[in-house]
Amino acid sequence: MSNLNHPRTLFKGGTILTMDKTVGNLAIGDLLVEHGRIAAIGQNIAVTDATVIDASDSIVMPGLIDAHHHMWLGAMRRMMPDVHDLFAYIDVVAETLGCHYRPLDMYLSTRLTALACLDAGITTVIDACHSSRSPEHTDAALDALDGSGIRALHMVGAAMDKKASSAHLPGDLKRLADNWNQGDGLVRVGLFGQLNLDWWKVARSLNMRILTEFIGDLAKLGPEFAEEGVLGPHSIFNHCTRIPRETWRLFANAGVNITVNPRSDALFGFDDESFAYQQAIDHGLTPAIGIDLDTAFGSDMFGEMHALFLQQRSAMRYRKFRGEDNVPLPITVERVLEAATVNGARAAGLESEVGSLAPGKQADIIMVRADGVAVIPVNNAVGTIVQAVERSDVDTVMVAGEIRKRGGKLVGTDLIKLSSEIAASRDYLLEKSGYRLDRLGAPAPEEAA
């Protein structure tokens, strides 16, 4: 989608959080967008022929970056809010329901998740698709992302259920790279390769980033992963819970990207007081945060920021009270916001384009209202974003200069139609699978006993 003819947009008179140390923040300032990029940041910017957005009583900042999200699960929202067993989760989402996904279901679930992300101020997402059942399913997911207007790195991966075939992978990567990784489009493709080094070689020959979900209790890295060039800045490792120190040293030496999912990692009990986020920090890495799944949560990075802040402090306090020496300091709201912006941009390979506000960068910007009763007064802008605001406070969302949300409403989205379509998709999956859904969440007999 071209932005060349998009009019100038001026955010006027807001508190500006740039997340860029060289540019700095402004208590009151303006931000000018031209042709999809940030043209200027300063006070009292004089410009003509611009659409002026009144940013008074608002915070203008980079769009949030969701560094790990299984977007294809949109139709299964909150089906398993209490799940604690990873394999029980896989049995439902993959073996029971996911195996019946048509390309249409992939399209609708991905579109729903993308729009919900935009509504919550997320402008970039790393879409961890472990359900690339066929080239047609992949094309449907990519079309949904492209049509939504979100910026995305779609990671193509084998479906988890036993009925699926991955015979088209990694051979389909070349077609996808040719179609999506050329030019300056918002949607790009990488590989959700787990630990399949043969697939990794194909992805690297196409200059793709590679995603691996890595839980120390379930997987180990063999010596072949320490060979030169196997790991590097192109590598994204998610979860990274309970992994040995030698693996952390390998990650640090290679400069891989680490992403964690504060709510999901706690939901499944993946993490402990060693705390993967802190381990990454201690080894000089820059961990980002993601939502992971909608089967328990929603597309909301504010919840992830809340969880990260509290979990790090709880884990470090436990280590201190247990008598450990040299326990890391409590996390700050600044570090949390970095995890949700600049660190996520780095994980996606987009740090030169998004994640912070500076002249020349892509205009991926959100404006958050700070005049609500739950927010006023704004005594600390970063603390307000991390600890106080919610998706309902996100007034304006811009991606590459295009307005995707304005006045608290998504632009160009028929939510009634989308709701009907996603309900029909869900009902189809329930009918095909025979899975019973209880909207009231009544406990099973053994739970009620």
Image: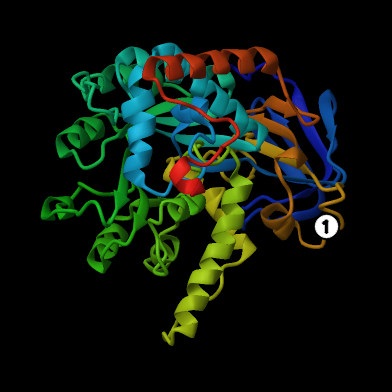
Label count reads: 1
Which residue is depicted at the point 33% across and 23% down? 132
Q: Out of 86 and 127, give the one closest to the viewer.
A: 86
Tell me how the rendering is colored.
Answer: rainbow
Percent x, y of residue 41: 73, 44
Position of residue 343 relative to residue 136, above or below, is: below
Percent x, y of residue 109: 50, 22
The residue under label 1 is which amino acid type? Val
Q: Quarter holding the N terminus?
A: top right
Q: Out of 414 and 82, give the one closest to the viewer.
A: 82
Report which quarter residue 86 is drawn in: top left
**Residue furthest toward the left?**
223
Q: Left or right: where does residue 190 sit relative to residue 9?
A: left
Q: Left or right: where does residue 353 sit relative to residue 54?
A: left
Q: Left or right: where does residue 50 sit relative to residue 241?
A: right
Q: Does residue 194 appear in the picture of this structure?
A: yes
Report which quarter residue 179 is drawn in: top left
Percent x, y of residue 185: 49, 22
Percent x, y of residue 216: 27, 57
Position of residue 272 relative to residue 416, above or below, is: below
Label 1, residues with CA under 10 Å away: few <14, some 14-19, many ≥20: some
Which residue is depicted at the point 84% across and 30% down? 52
Q: Out of 119 and 106, give the one closest to the viewer.
A: 106
Which residue is depicted at the point 25% across and 32% down? 203
Q: Left or right: where does residue 279 sit relative to residue 4?
A: left
State the SS at label 1.
loop
Which residue is depicted at the point 70% across and 28% down? 34
Query: What residue is disc 1 on?
Result: 378
Q: Does residue 143 appear in the picture of this structure?
A: no
